[in-house]
Structure formats: structure tokens, C-alpha cells
Amino acid sequence: MSQRFGGKYSPPPQNNITSDQDVPRADAPQLRADVKASKVGARANFMFIAPLPIAVFAFGKAPIAMAIALAGFGLLMIAAWLLREGLKAEEAYESRKVARRPAIPRKIMASVATGLGLGLAGFASDQGLVAPVIYAALGAVLHFVSFGPDPLKDKGMEGINTFQTNRVAEAVDKAEAHLQAMTDAILRAKDREVERKVEQFQQDARTMFRKVEEDPRDLTAARKYLSVYLMGARDATVKFADYYGRSRDPQARKDYLALLNDLSGQFRSKTDVMLLDDRSDLDVEIEVLRDRLAREGVTSGS
């Protein structure tokens, strides 16, 4: 019988804390409350299904009309793919406090492709030239209204050194790739509690990502965590998922959960240290400013 992680029967962490109740952190329900629903939902997935009737009825037409209808179907499927990728890029943009706009406006391109696809489908139906133009215009406009544009400007980068932000963006992108690899791998273990613990660790890691994005000066102190530690966590997750998926070894599960608990504690501790450093810098700036004001005869009572 598997043990519940996070309760009184959990294996004790390695940092001399006897239970998770002693750890000053948010519990799983609070973490989940902060997670927004994915934009890549039913509406986006439906865009892959909606064009199917065009392909089905295309085979009952003359060869030229069939080719035009299938071309329209192809454009609509491309539009659905562009939309899905654009929504993923928008999610990544919105999750960060400092972010560059997507290099390719996929959602806008999806609106244009939808209009062209519907126009070709209408043209293949021998309805003249006016109807296909109306289909194309309405399709593009309604798609744009339904899903909106891509983010069109950088966020949170005013007054920040471009070279530093590029370094941070590159480091965070690589770190996110490690987290995604962990997500993909842990699914093979087929253990929901372990998946939840991986998600919890990823939440702690992303808290550090956001801190580094807010202040690129923290990148030097956090680089080991964003690269070495996450790479090790990724490799350990892959090996655990492959082994546990075959053996269901309870000791391996216990050891892996203890590892994640230790990593989460390390990431939280480092993030707290960076926040304290920021507060120390602020206190120094305040004291310097007060000294200058005092030398000029300006006091709080003036």
C-alpha cells in the first residue's frame, strides 16, 4: 500500500524537519488555486475537427473543385495548428513578468489562414466569387475576435539592460525545457501522487525563475539552480520513471519523493535569500538617501 506524501506518514525530509506541517509553505490546494486554466482547451481543439466535412464532401466533386476544396481543408488544418501553438506561446508570455513578444504572430496568421481556407472551400462549391469572399472575410474576422491577437509588445523590459534580459531569457528557456522533460517523463510512472509532487517542485522552481526575471542581477547566483540542479532533476526523473514504471518499487518511490522534497527546499531557500538580498539593497539605498537629506537640512518633519 502506497504512503501518502505530505501527511503524517510521509518520509521525513533531509533538512532536520520532522514533517511537512513544520514547513512554512503553501500546501498543494493553494498551489493549484494559483494555476490558471490552459488556453489550449476545447475551442482550440475543435478547430481541428470543424474542417473535416470539407474534406469528406470534396471527394464528390470534379477534380479541379476537389483539389481546391482539399487545399482549403489543408489551410484550415494549418490554421488550427498555428492557433494552438500561438495559444501556447501566449500562455508562456503571460506566465512571466518579464518577457519578449512571440517572434511569430501565430494567432494572427491563423486568422488569415482560416479566412483563406474558407474562401477556397466556398470557391470549390461553385457559388460564384462573392460568396467565397464573404466566407473569407467573415472567417478571418470571427476567428480574430474569438481568439484575439498575439502579444505585440515586450513586457516588463522598460529600463532594463537588453543584454542582461537576453541572458535571463535564454537561461529560463533552457530551465523550462528541463521542467517540460520532467513532465513528459513522469507520466510514464503512472502515479498521480508522484506527478503532483513533480508539479509542486516545478512551482518552486518557477518562483525562482520569476525572481530572476524581475532582477537579472540574480542570474549569477541562480545559474547553478537553473542549469545543474534542474538537469540533474530531469535525469533522475527519467531514470525513476523508466524503473518505477516496470518495477513499482516502493523504496525507489520513497527515495525519489525525498529527492524532490530536498530540491524544493533548496530552491525555496535560495529564492528567500535572493529576496533578503534585495531588501538589504533597498535598506542601504534608503539610508544613503536619508543621510543626504540630513546633510542638506531636510528632515521628515520639514
Image: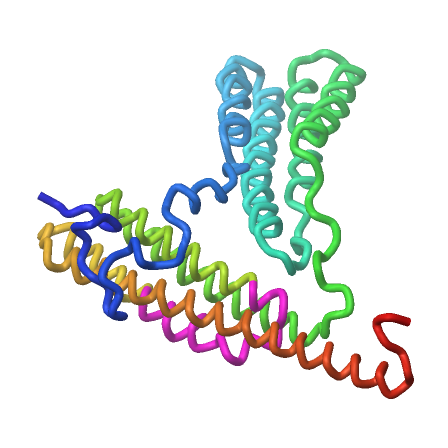
The reply, left or right, for residue 225 in relation to residue 136 is: left
Closer to us: 192 or 282: 282
Examine the image and state in which quarter residue 121 appears: top right
The reply, left or right, for residue 295 in relation to residue 228 is: right
Is residue 227 part of the magenta span, yes or no? yes
What number of labels is visible? 0
Q: Position of residue 150 (x, y in %)?
A: 68, 44
Using the image, determine if residue 204 lies above or below residue 40: below
Identify the image quadrant of the N terminus.
Answer: top left
Using the image, determine if residue 60 lies above or below residue 148: above
Q: Position of residue 102 (x, y in %)?
A: 65, 53
Examine the image and state in which quarter residue 135 appears: top right
Q: Residue placed at 37% from the left, 48% from the top?
A: 27
Q: Position of residue 98 (x, y in %)?
A: 65, 60
Q: Residue placed at 76% from the left, 15% from the top?
A: 131
Q: Position of residue 192 (x, y in %)?
A: 26, 43
The reply, left or right, for residue 149 in relation to residue 177 is: right
Q: Residue furthest front?
A: 301
Q: Residue placed at 72% from the left, 64% from the top?
A: 157
Is residue 118 part of the magenta span, yes or no? no
Examine the image and state in which quarter residue 43 appears: top right
Using the image, determine if residue 111 lies above or below residue 120: below
Using the image, determine if residue 17 lies above or below residue 59: below
Give the residues drawn in magenta, as a range: 211-233
Q: Which scheme is used to colour this image of the protein?
A: rainbow
Identify the image quadrant of the C terminus.
Answer: bottom right
